[in-house]
Image: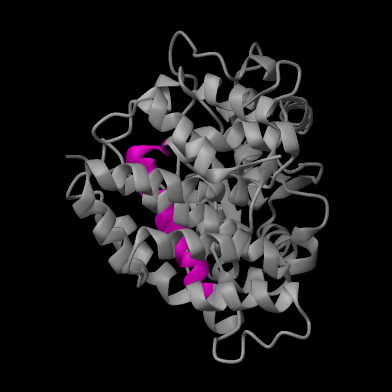
Amino acid sequence: MRFYVPTDIYVEKDCVKNHAKELLAIGKRALIVTGHSSAKANGSLNDVTEVLNNGGVAYQIFDEVEENPSTDTVGKGAQIARDFSADFIIGIGGGSAIDAAKAMAILLVNPSVIADELHKAPAKPLGHAPVVAVPTTCGTGSEATPFAIITNHKINLKKSIPHRIFPVLALVDGKYLASAKKQLIVNTAVDALAHMVESILNVHSNMLNRMCPEYGLKLWGECKEALIASVAANNSATQNTSQNAAPIDASLYEKLMYTSTIAGMSIAMTSTAVPHGMSYDLTLSKGTPHGPAVGYFLAAYVEICQKKVPTDVEKILSLLGLQSVEEFTEMLRKLIGTCTVSREMSNKFAAAMKVNRSKLDLVPGGITPEEVEFIYDKSLIVG
């Protein structure tokens, strides 16, 4: 058994300012990688630049990262980092910004590698510039993983690049959720849920690395009613469904961010499994946000695993405060609704997944082609 997370992680209010010394020790010239506006709105960008200014660290801001960052974007950012002579990269935002920062860190110190080749396995491990992660959403846990999901639109491919890039420092502060849209919080929380479920229902799961997802699922379960109530209130201004449930507010921000980081630590040990593998085609073909795209397949995956590792499924449900897979399915439906695709699209997705050994081989007890088809048929509405 092995447990390995080399990232120095701090989770607390005003984390960036409290750990300015650690941040300033990373380097002298930073490329800050973020999205178009959220880091400005939630105050995270200002917190980071204030520390850098006070510490005399030069920086340049690259704020062009899109959802599901592309090879074109990371290539552009890496070139800007080279031109600026950056010696480290700071990713501020959700998984897209942090994943893009990781990819740029590879390209920065390997100028012979072009961005469109990031998905190709290198002959030998490549070095990378140090990465600092400041997450502002409660889903990907990228601050605690070595993974970076990048999209190559030229070949219609979205998947993790085969390079392991753990951030050297992660500064996690729940206050950055305050300005996030509630549906974004819900969507990213579903992604964190999937990370923990897939980490347990995984051939790499063991007694040591289960400490993370089991504790994280308990915390997630304490937030689920507030998440459901938030969606219900958003869907119907007149339906007072949230009357008896706590709203998503400052009292939950830290817990949700903490859970997300724990979920990231979980998949750092095991990798994600089938639901994540299925989600990428859905995002590429329909533009479905990552959290819901994973969540649509999660309940059916749990149902399949119940036949193979029933004790593990029972443990997951218990930690979440649920009694059955049916309750788990209904909870997800309340959070993310349903997804409709054409029969042609569903068949295309299933055919591709049936040969995706990198995910299929992670299923405890194995999975048959018929079970793959079952997950698609149970998860998507064909219309």
Q: Which of 118/59 is in front?
A: 118
Q: Is residue 294 visible?
A: yes
Question: What number of labels is visible?
Answer: 0
Q: Residue 301: where, in percent of width, then height?
A: 41, 43
Instruction: Look at the image and tell me in which quarter the C terminus lies.
Output: top right
In this rendering, position of residue 145 left or right of residue 3: right
Q: Which of 133/129 is in front?
A: 133
Q: Which residue is pictured at 50% across the width and 52% down the height? A: 141
Quarter-wise, where is residue 149 in the image? Answer: top right
Q: Which range of residues does the magenta coloring cover?
A: 254-273
Q: Is residue 26 visible?
A: no
Q: Which residue is pictured at 34% across the width and 63% down the height? A: 324
Magenta region, main secondary structure:
helix
Asked if residue 50 is positioned above or below residue 163 in the image, the reply reads below
Asked if residue 219 is positioned above or below residue 280 in the image, the reply reads below
Instruction: Look at the image and tell me in which quarter the N terminus lies.
Output: top left
In this rendering, position of residue 129 left or right of residue 55: left
Q: Which of 218/30 is in front?
A: 218
